Image (cartoon, rainbow, N blue to C red):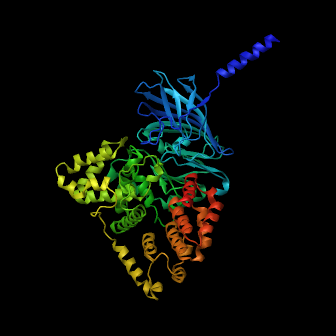
């Protein structure tokens, strides 16, 4: 008996020696870096390369795998720290030896820190883990939520700090990593990533990916589903569900023309292929500039190429954002302001100045709307902001996009387009694959634009534009010629016969948006009834027009829109549309309860980030 007791005691001792305890730290932050919204000690120990092996489990809604990081311990630190959001850490090995690890308690919206001891000479850490079914980076779709209705689907959205819910990482934009990935999917499905991608399904469901160009963690992206590919030309194409493939490829057939215009301004495209994935309807934003594979909302597939300006924006990110990246989310305007300006230059080349002027004006209207909501003295109306303890998502307003773009437009108009274009091209090439801060950008601008002409800098009032609140008085603004014609129609609305006399056959969606925004909110339901009878606006299939029309209808108590509004809210997941519509309903005594009923009915159709944002509206 003693012999058996000794045997089982030895087995127990061996088992205990192989345990991987998650020693919960009493510290709620594990040295949380408020400026970077990160637990990582990336400045001391810097991750350089990721090897990711992952298996997709649709039944459990989890991704399980191992993230193996190669790192450089520049400071001879005794620990390496990662960002982790609700990941179940199973086992950790450093240079092949098993080790314990600490996980701090959750810190507000930023997740938990993962701390791993390392020794001098260590350079590899392998972390075996599982994601949570509620990971903020991942949306899991049932077959019924896809176009084909046969297979499930998942996609990720890691910007700004959601990559930490997909895999343990140093989730800051200031460092860049290369990666290889091995993804196992169920049979009959395709996986695609922000990397070199397959163009056909693998019967085994095994896919290998390589991203040999260093990128920040927020640009790691994955989609898995019933996905097919169609080439547009030798270096661009479209991925989507089979039923949408031909239509999407036709809609995006101008990508090569856009790319030519982009390269003329920014220099050579450095990423190889440029493809677009048309995601399912629940995709939460317009587009995401994942390198080599933009993820885009299906709402841009309007059938007439009228909404593909969004592709010009995401393509422009291949230079501003992906090539030269904001070092912190306080510097977001360096990504989005430069990109919005770049997008407008592409569209001017592709569609002409009068068309592009409408884009500038609609963006200006969006900027004024946000300035009104924030108040002119709000610190959040500065270009360079301080996020502090807030989630970086709070920075994604029209301020960094539109105020940043008009600031650059003012610089261009002041120094001349030829000089500014040379500056812009040199800026991208000389800072490629580097993080950029506001101070560093302005110093480069001083050296290459204002050194010989300091009067230009004072004329622009650079300090006020970047570090001041509100909108300076010298904001460039030219009212579009094509909108002047729309204004005539709006002014003529006072005449009873004007509704039937309006000639809108040549209008783009941009004229319609300006028209609908220009109508009184609220208007008389009888006016909306006459507009609807003439132009059938309730039946529009253009998502941009639909959103503006439904907002007007909600504010005006026009019940005719309700069935179409319900269908729209059930099938569209883009925050740009959902937030204004739910906000309008909640502000209405008549529709407030309906808003809650619709949200409860369709909340599972929305991405976790979108659902969270919509829930917050009720508490504001």
Residue 148 in view (yes/no): no
Residue that sits furthest to the top in the current view = 3
Measuring from the top left, give residue 466's x and y in whole percent.
Answer: 31, 53
Measuring from the top left, give residue 563's x and y in whole percent.
Answer: 62, 72
Residue at image point 51% right, 53% down: 238
Residue 193 in view (yes/no): yes
Residue 536 figure quarter: bottom right
Residue 117 vs residue 264, the one in the foreground:
117
Eyeballing the image, is 4 above or below 365? above
Measuring from the top left, give residue 2's x and y in whole percent.
Answer: 80, 11
Q: How many marks?
A: 0
542 sits left or right of 150 in the view: left
Residue that sits furthest to the front in the current view = 26
Measuring from the top left, give residue 120's x and y in whole percent.
Answer: 45, 21
Residue 509 figure quarter: bottom left
Residue at image point 40% right, 26% down: 75
Residue 44 vs residue 453, the one in the foreground:
44
Looking at the figure, which quarter contains the N terminus?
Answer: top right
340 sits left or right of 198 in the view: left
Eyeballing the image, is 316 above or below 50? below
């Amino acid at each position: 008996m003693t012999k058996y007791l000794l045997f089982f005691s030895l087995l127990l001792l061996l088992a205990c020696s192989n345990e991987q305890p998650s020693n919960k730290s009493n510290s709620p932050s594990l040295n949380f870096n408020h400026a970077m919204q990160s637990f990582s000690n990336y400045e001391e120990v810097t991750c350089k390369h990721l090897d990711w092996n992952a298996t997709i489990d649709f039944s459990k809604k989890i991704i399980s795998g191992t993230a193996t990081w190669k790192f450089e311990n520049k400071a001879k630190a005794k620990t390496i720290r990662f960002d982790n959001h609700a990941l179940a850490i199973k086992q950790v090995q450093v240079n092949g030896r098993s080790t314990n690890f600490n996980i701090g308690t959750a810190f507000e919206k930023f997740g938990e820190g993962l701390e791993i001891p390392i020794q001098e000479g260590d350079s590899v850490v392998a972390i075996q883990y599982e994601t949570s079914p509620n990971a903020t980076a991942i949306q899991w779709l049932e077959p019924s939520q896809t176009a084909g209705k046969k297979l499930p689907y998942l996609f990720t959205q890691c910007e700004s700090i959601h990559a930490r819910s997909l895999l343990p990482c140093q989730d800051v934009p200031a460092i860049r990593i290369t990666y290889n990935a091995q993804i196992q999917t169920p049979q009959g499905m395709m996986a695609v990533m922000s990397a070199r991608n397959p163009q056909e399904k693998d019967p085994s469901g095994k896919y290998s990916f390589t991203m040999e160009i260093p990128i920040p963690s927020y640009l790691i992206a994955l989609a898995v589903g019933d996905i097919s590919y169609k080439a547009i030309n030798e270096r661009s194409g479209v991925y989507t569900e089979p039923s949408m493939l031909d239509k999407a490829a036709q809609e995006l057939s101008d990508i090569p023309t856009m790319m030519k215009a982009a390269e003329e301004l920014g220099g050579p495209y450095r990423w190889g292929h440029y493809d677009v994935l048309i995601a399912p309807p629940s995709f939460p934003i317009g587009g995401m500039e994942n390198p080599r594979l933009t993820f885009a909302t299906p709402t841009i597939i309007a059938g007439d190429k009228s909404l593909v300006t969004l592709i010009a924006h995401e393509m422009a990110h291949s230079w501003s954002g992906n090539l030269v990246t904001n070092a912190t989310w306080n510097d977001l305007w360096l990504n989005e302001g430069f990109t919005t300006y770049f997008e407008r230059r592409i569209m001017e080349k592709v569609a002409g100045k009068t068309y592009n002027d409408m884009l500038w004006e609609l963006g200006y209207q969006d900027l004024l709307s946000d300035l009104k909501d924030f108040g002119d003295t709000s610190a959040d109306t500065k270009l360079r902001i301080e996020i502090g303890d807030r989630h970086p998502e709070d920075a994604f307003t029209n301020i960094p996009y539109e105020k940043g773009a008009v600031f650059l437009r003012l610089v261009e108009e002041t120094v001349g387009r030829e000089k500014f274009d040379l500056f812009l091209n040199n800026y991208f090439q000389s800072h490629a694959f580097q993080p950029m801060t506001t101070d560093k950008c302005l110093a480069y601008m001083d050296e290459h634009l204002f050194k010989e002409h300091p009067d230009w800098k004072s004329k622009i009032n650079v300090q006020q534009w970047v570090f001041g609140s509100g909108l300076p008085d010298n904001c460039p603004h030219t009212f579009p010629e094509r909108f002047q014609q729309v204004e005539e129609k709006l002014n003529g609305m006072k005449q009873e016969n004007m509704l039937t006399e309006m000639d809108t056959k040549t209008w783009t969606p941009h004229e319609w948006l300006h028209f609908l925004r220009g109508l009184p909110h609220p208007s008389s339901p009888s006016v909306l009834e006459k507009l609807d009878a003439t132009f059938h606006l309730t039946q529009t299939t253009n998502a941009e027009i639909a959103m503006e029309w439904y907002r007007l209808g909600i504010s005006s108590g026009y019940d005719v829109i309700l069935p179409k509004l319900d269908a729209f809210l059930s099938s569209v997941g883009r925050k740009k549309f959902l937030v204004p519509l739910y906000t309008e309903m909640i502000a209405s005594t008549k529709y407030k309860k309906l808003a809650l009923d619709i949200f409860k009915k369709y909340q599972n159709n929305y991405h976790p980030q979108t659902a969270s944002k919509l829930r917050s509206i009720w508490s504001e």
